[in-house]
Image (cartoon, helix red, strand yellow):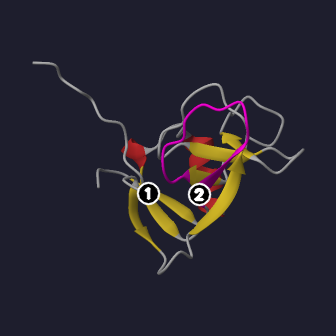
Amino acid sequence: MQIKTEGVHAGEFLLSEAPGTRSRDEGVLAPTAVDLPAGQILGVITADSTYAPYDPEAVDGTETAAAVLFNPKPASDEAQLATLVVRDAEVVDTRLTGLDETSEAGLLVAGIVVREGTP
């Protein structure tokens, strides 16, 4: 029997969010060479205001965590629209990609609280 490991499903990292769609916005992801999972922490590239994976070593804006990707996105040579959690939410630490102390602090500034545990 072959065992299949599933990734994080859309929104699976959320513990709570504001009513309606207040916690979410649509944003533009910069082109990416890799698939991005739901729960990927993102920063904003200051040159063009697109979102890209948080990178603590960067100097282009992505060194500051600003959002969490709501659903997985495939690699793409083109920019693509994405649903993002950008405010007023609680998320589970074990379901996030790119989490460190600095990204956790950046998310808190945005109103996204990281909690320990599993959903």
Residue identifier under label 2: 84
Identify the residue shown where x is 49% and y is 67%: 89
The N terminus lies in quadrant? top left
Query: In this picture, is 7 found above or below 108?
Result: above
Is 119 left or right of 92, judged from the image as shown? left
Task: Tell whether position 100 is magenta.
Answer: no
Check disc 1 and report its element: helix, strand or loop.
strand
Which residue ends up furthest to the bottom in the rendered image? Answer: 19
For the residues labelled 1 and 2, the Cα–Cα distance comes to: 13 Å
Identify the residue shown where x is 56% and y is 52%: 68
Is 49 left or right of 100, judged from the image as shown? right
Is 55 left or right of 83, judged from the image as shown? right
**Location of residue 118 in the rendering, given as x and y in whole percent from the top left corner:** 29, 50
**Location of residue 100 in the rendering, given as x and y in whole percent from the top left corner:** 55, 39
Sequence-first tag of 1 and 2? 2
Which residue ends up furthest to the left in the rendered image? Answer: 1
**Location of residue 50 in the rendering, given as x and y in whole percent from the top left corner:** 77, 48
Check disc 2 and report its element: helix, strand or loop.
strand
> In the image, what residue type sits under mark 1?
Val
Which residue ends up furthest to the right in the rendered image? Answer: 47
> In the image, what residue type sits under mark 2?
Leu
- Which labelled disc corresponds to residue 91? 1
Task: Tell whether position 84 is magenta.
Answer: yes
Q: Tell me the quarter of the picture where residue 42 sits.
A: top right
Identify the residue shown where x is 67% and y is 53%: 66
- Number of callouts in the render? 2
- Which labelled disc corresponds to residue 61? none
Please report the bounds of the magenta region as a residue range: 69-85
Identify the residue shown where x is 77% and y is 31%: 58
Return the residue nearer the eye: 12 or 32. 32
Return the residue nearer the eye: 67 or 37. 37
